[in-house]
Amino acid sequence: MHLTYFSSKDWKSWDLERPPLIPEGMPVLADEDLIFEDNGVPRPAAVANLWLRELPISGAPARRTWKSYAQALRNWFEFLATIDVHPFDERTVLRAALAAFSEYRFAGPLEERWDEGTWDQNISTVARFYAWAVDEGHCAAVPFTYAVVRRYTEAGLQLVRKNTATVRRAKPHVTVKYLEADFLQLFLRGLAGLRPDGEPDAFRGRHLGRNEAMGSLVASAGPRAQEFTHLLIYELPRAPARRTEVPIRFRLAAAITKGKKARETWASWDSLAKMGQYIELDRAGILAGRQYRPAPRLGEPLLVSDPDWEGGKVNGRRVSWRKLTLNERLRLVTPEGEPAIIGVKSDGTPFVDWATAFRRTSERIRQDFEPRFPIVGPHMLRHTMAMLTLERLVKGHYQRAAALVADTNEDAALALYLTKQDPMLVLRDLLGHSSVVTTEIYIQRLDVHRIYRELYESAGRESGLAQAEALAEFENEEDGSW
């Protein structure tokens, strides 16, 4: 089965009266013979394409999600073809096929085996497709059985519908989800080519300043991978001349955020200072004398003139940066003939593979310094920002700093916000969640107990209470009775 991605380029030559109403980059599945229907009846691939086209308005606006969903359906359809089962066959046949699929993915050829997480992700996607297909009348049966299970949460007993085809996985708390302060320092020094003690390492990698600056920014502001990868030099706030403990406002445009929701987060003075140094020194040195032209696969260059922090003229027309798509950002060429994307490679083109840069640094730290060190990805740094920020909010760090700023009138609005708002609501806004309930669930999957344990301990010491009394607040934590 073929999997390709839709592009409306040259649509006027298709003999259409208007542009096709299909999102750019939408996955398209097709059988080997490239036929989408038989005797007027759409084939399963065509039905799957209808479902994929509705994803942007069905709670899945991200292109990466579209791609993973399409790949999951292709995996299922291709397996059914090998055992000569139609995707819309009767239920008993489909359930037998599902059992064979499970055997194939867990005990089949080594190169085709999946782990539990990959299996659950694919099966959940296929289940969503079948539920939609039944509702729309494309098929009459699904291969899945559902059970109602009881789960105990802080809100009490909850009844949850569970797909019995999914498999049990390790609890979230058994894996590292974020970096503690010492590991974060170790990681940032590793990105900068330094040893754990801060001295130069024998490692002689390139772009150390770039990697450290971006790692520091992500751990401070918590943007997602596509958000910080496509940031423009014009959108990055500048660090004030005088160092401040109060974070600096940092706006993220809707065009690059998950769910297309603009939000405002913040970044520390230190991270912005590092990024400013990279842009003014390392980046400028790499780009000196170079003229950037986007790769043909991206499209024609978009020439920028008269840029400022809000927008600029793009091919002669005034445009706001917040309206530019990911592709358009990669095509921007500054008045100096440089890419407008912050991160650049040695050849002067935009750098977008941050996951690899972070992974290689993690592997080097594991090999040379700390075998317990986890493999760090962009989202782990986002988790790290959430935990460090919550810790500072709970312990009053930002509130005290904001009070000092209020006295000097630097940013009275931010100071008032920090001193009056509930910590969880602040974190909700920074992470871009629509509800504080989402933030609470998100935090519960990390290790919020440590923050409150340390807060109780420090409060006990400062007030003269016995440390044992503070520890008693967590006496039930070790046996899992919380």
Image (spheres, rainbow, N blue to C red):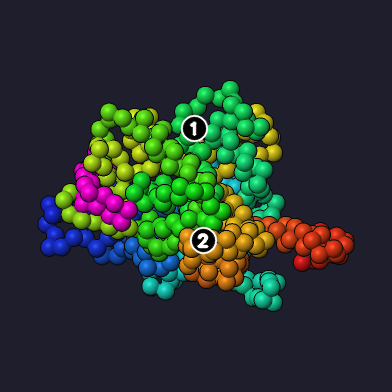
Which residue is found at the position 18% from the left and 60% from the top?
Answer: 19
Q: Which residues are magenta?
A: 295-314
Residue closest to the eye, 248 or 78: 248
Residue 297 covered by magenta stretch: yes
The image position of residue 186, as x and y in percent, is 63, 38
Q: Residue 37 shows which numbered tag?
A: none
- Name the residue that disc number 1 marks: 208
The image position of residue 456, as x and y in percent, is 77, 63
Which residue is found at the position 47% from the left and 67% from the top?
Answer: 413
Q: Residue 408 shows which numbered tag?
A: 2
Residue type at tag 1: Leu
Residue closest to the eye, 246 or 453: 246
Q: Is residue 128 visible?
A: yes
Does the residue at mark 1 contact the one at mark 2 (Cβ under 8 Å)? no
Side of 125 where 440 appears, left or right: right
Quote the CA–CA distance across marks 1 and 2. Answer: 36 Å
Task: Tell me: residue 133, above or below residue 30.
Answer: below
Residue type at tag 2: Thr
